[in-house]
Image (cartoon, rainbow, N blue to C red):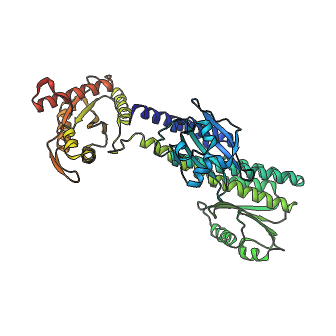
Amino acid sequence: MSQSAKASTVAAESLLTAVAEQVAGAGDLEGLTRPLLNILQRLTGLDSVYLTAIDWQADQQQILFSQNSGDMTIGEGLVVPWHDTLCRRALDENRFLTTDVPVRWGDSEAARALNIQTYASVPVKADDGEIFGTLCGASDHVAPVPEGTESVMSLFAQLVAHQIQLERAASHARQRARQAEDAARSFQGIAALAEQCSGATVLEEALHGCAGVLDSIWTDVTVRTCHPADEGPAKPVVRAFMNWLIGQQLTPDGAGWWNRRDDPDVFEAAGELVGPDIVGIGVACAMRRGQSAGSVLVLARALPSQGLAAQQMLTGLALHLSLLVTRLELRESLEASYREIERQARLDPLTALPNRRQLEEEGERLRARAVRHGGRVCAAFVDLDGFKQINDDHGHDAGDRFLMQVAVSLQTVTRAEEICARYGGDEFVLLALVPEHEADAFHDAVRDRLEEAVRGHYDLGDASIDYPGASVGVTIQASAEESLADLLVRADEAMYEVKRRRRGEGASGRRD
């Protein structure tokens, strides 16, 4: 990996960490989208990244939000004919990335006007398959988009789609509230329920909070929750009734309201759960892929004064609970993606050993422990003598297999409190913290351990070799304050001294 690519990866990870909480807690589409665009531009290096909306009836596409760098600018509010867009072509061809736009889609006037060379696009799609728009990136030059960008953009598109659905649902809820001014108290309850959902970090917390709200705004009701984590003697009865409702009565939105007079079969199914004084049953479920993840059950001894508002309230509650479940899942998925990106950025892609960046971070931690608690950091520099000859004789694939097998051997003899990393090329480094009184013995022991680990027979596919061993240079901090960089320089020098002795070339030894 080039230095510029490494710097780009480090910057992207830092930015991902900084905005993760802001993204997860975004209050509206713009507040969600702008941090995502910032992440994408840092991650991909594309000149422009943007979110679009598609008006299918008008055959138009509009740029909602964009972030630009460099000479190419895609302005917010720009409206273009949908049939001429690169987005349409990418969707039709199911193509995420194109680095030869003029060749592949030379008939696009918009692409020619902006001189677009590199283009990436994923659809922003609702749960039912409706495409709201696209999440895109473009450059006026051929840009190397990092591996894994498509999965990150697809995840971000999911976040945007669910935010759009949330805002559409909120818009519909506001419209219903205006149409039902006589049920103002009930809709104030919806707001309180939404607050419970928006402030919850786990579903069970939201269910209990919403049960409390319903109990406070309706009179003569008993409100219960049903959640997999709930326990108690009455829970199996509640759970059995909820399962029946979901299978027989519940609408796809996860809510319902039933009166004893109009829905006797529901009351019969409730059995011992409802006495003769119960005249109304209401339910709101957190729906996840057609199944209930948890629910709130209302048993009313007197019907709310506004029966329609009661149904609307439960429908609104079910919507907020379902969106909470979706948001929590997406947040967990996003955080898992961040953790995986961070983990991959600290591993060597060929050997899966820690890379130089992680070695330096762990080395600084060892130095800090040495300063606080005593001891010295030991550095062992391993150089694979003859590696160039292996590549020349057997090919680079064989060389890669050799490096991977060496990495396994080194990892096998690395102790739990040590770190072994690929430093670059055919060089590996082991760091360990040793007590001062054991330093001399450890110096020789770690050298012998590493030399023995590397020496041996290697099956390289079409060829096999008996490898005589590597040059291992070991050095220990002169003092706990010696920097890691100085320690590694001395370990490198010690390794070259070993290499010179092994070759019998005096001070003229050179690296393979």
Quadrant of the rendering where the N terminus is positioned = top left
Q: Nearer the viewer, residue 341 or 241?
A: 341
Residue 331 showing in the rendered view: no
Depth check: give the residue in front, 465 or 189.
465
What is the x, y in percent for residue 237?
66, 71
Image check: 268 left or right of 84?
right
In which quarter of the view is residue 233 placed?
bottom right
Left or right relative to 196: residue 106: left
Residue 335 on image: x %, y %: 53, 46
- Quadrant in which the C terminus is drawn: top left
Q: Quick one: 502 or 307, which is closer to the camera?
A: 502
Considering every residue shown, the one lying at the far left of the view is 504
Task: Work out whether 378 lies above or below 132.
Answer: above
Q: Where is residue 360 in the image (x, y as percent from the top left)?
A: 36, 32
Q: Which residue ends up furthest to the front in the rendered image? A: 107
Quick check: 122 left or right of 397? right
Identify which residue, 82 or 490, lies in the foreground: 82
The quadrant holding residue 252 is: bottom right
What residue is shown at x 27% (from left), y 43% (from top)? 414
How many marks the image carries: the answer is 0
Evaluate whether residue 73 shows in this view: yes
> Where 387 sits versus 154, above or below?
above
Q: In which quarter of the image is residue 115?
A: top right
Residue 470 x, y percent position in the rendering = 18, 38
